[in-house]
Amino acid sequence: MAKDYYNSLGVDKGATKDEIKKAYKRLAKKYHPDINKEDNASDKFKEINEAASILGDDQKRAQYDQFGTADASGFDYRDFGGFSSQGGDFDFGDIFDMFFGGGSRQSGRRSYKGSDLRFDLTLKLEEVADDIEKKIKIPRLETCESCNGNGAKSSSDITTCSQCNGSGRVTRTRRTPFGMFQTTAGCNTCHGEGKIISNPCSKCDGQGRVQKKSTVNIKIPAGVDNGMRLRVTGEGESGIKGGPSGDLYVVIHVDDHDVFVRDGDDLYMDVPISYTQAVLGDTIEVPTLDGKTNLKIPQGTDTHTIFRIRSKGIPHLNHAGQGDQKVRVTIQTQKRLNKKQMDLLKEFAKESGETPSLSFFKKIFDKI
């Protein structure tokens, strides 16, 4: 019976080469005998390698699709070496090149993006009420100005690797049950760079980057809150060998305030008033983040009444509008009274038809 290579890899007959490659990679990692110790792992690994060797080759796949065979008898996964960390030389990259070709791989000096950085910035509550700019200093790796990041003392100290002829990769030929196959791997002489530096830059020791403490200007929008992150593109560490710089992530922390408590974009505060102010009413002056404002206390105000002052809170982040300021009044009881004050309060209680103690207990009992 003809083998169903598509079924072996779990792909449809019309699968693209990329889909076949992904399926093979997933199954090869799962069933390689040095990873999977189950009894049937070796047979399964042999099966998927055989399938990949046929379906990854356009000519063999066309023959298989037409005749149901591509003459893969005698295939042995052991021809591709071991996978274990104890010295095996199995390389999924090599076998991908063998089955699917390695022409798309990069060659020559490779560049890498620089690392992203984090900076924790603490702000006062007053600072988040408006758009501001902050200058911060961060330690980071930057491109070496002496060698412009190439790592050499001078441009003449950079030569093309003779082993790989500047490609950064070396091609090897292997004999397999299906014929001669070529595999491509990184060059050991130049470590995949394609270039050899004979005289490294003394300032960066050939690394192309040096450690510096740099000043970065950060624009902070109004309304930011604890834990928010601002990304500053390109202000991370410099890239390697001409690669792009990483990004800087600024994490916001807002200090507690002595007067205000923030809840979203609203601000809360407590203001003490006297018994007389609560009973007779008054206009008092209260602080806000941008100065002072007047607040009217109506007659008969109870303790813990909350008044709202519109648009005196924190601006909405990236939106129009602003939160409110909530003012909670608490009635202060005067602890020391002179004789005249005590007589007046007793007279007030008498005119009200109650004594202070009876009035208090009546309110308690009414709530039970």
Image (cartoon, rainbow, N blue to C red):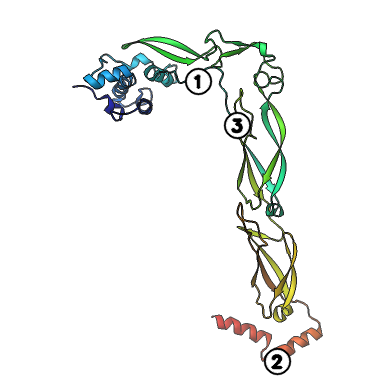
SS label for mark 2: helix
3D distance between C-alphas at marks 1 and 3: 21 Å
Q: Position of residue 69 (x, y in %)?
A: 23, 18
**Label of residue 80 in the image:** none
2 or 3: mark nearer the eye: 3
Q: Position of residue 244 (x, y in %)?
A: 60, 29
Q: Which picture quadrant has residue 198? A: top right
Q: Which residue is mark 2?
A: 351
1 or 2: mark nearer the eye: 1
Does 197 sit above or below residue 45? above
SS label for mark 3: loop
Q: Are marks 2 and 3 in contact (CB under 8 Å)?
A: no
Q: Position of residue 92 (x, y in %)?
A: 41, 21
Does 282 sit above or below residue 211? below
| Crowdedness near tag 2: few (<14), some (14–19) or many (≥20) residues, C-alpha within 10 Å | few
| Crowdedness near tag 3: few (<14), some (14–19) or many (≥20) residues, C-alpha within 10 Å | some
Q: Which residue is mark 1?
A: 106
1 or 3: mark nearer the eye: 1
Q: Is residue 173 left or right of residue 166?
A: left
In the displayed image of the protein, which residue is found farthest to the left?
1
Does 247 sit above or below residue 75? below
- Of the pair 197 and 233, the residue shown nearer to us: 233
Q: Position of residue 249 (x, y in %)?
A: 62, 40
In the displayed image of the protein, which residue is found farthest to the top?
162
Location of the N terminus by quadrant is top left
**Label of residue 115 in the image:** 3
Q: Is residue 99 left or right of residue 184?
A: left
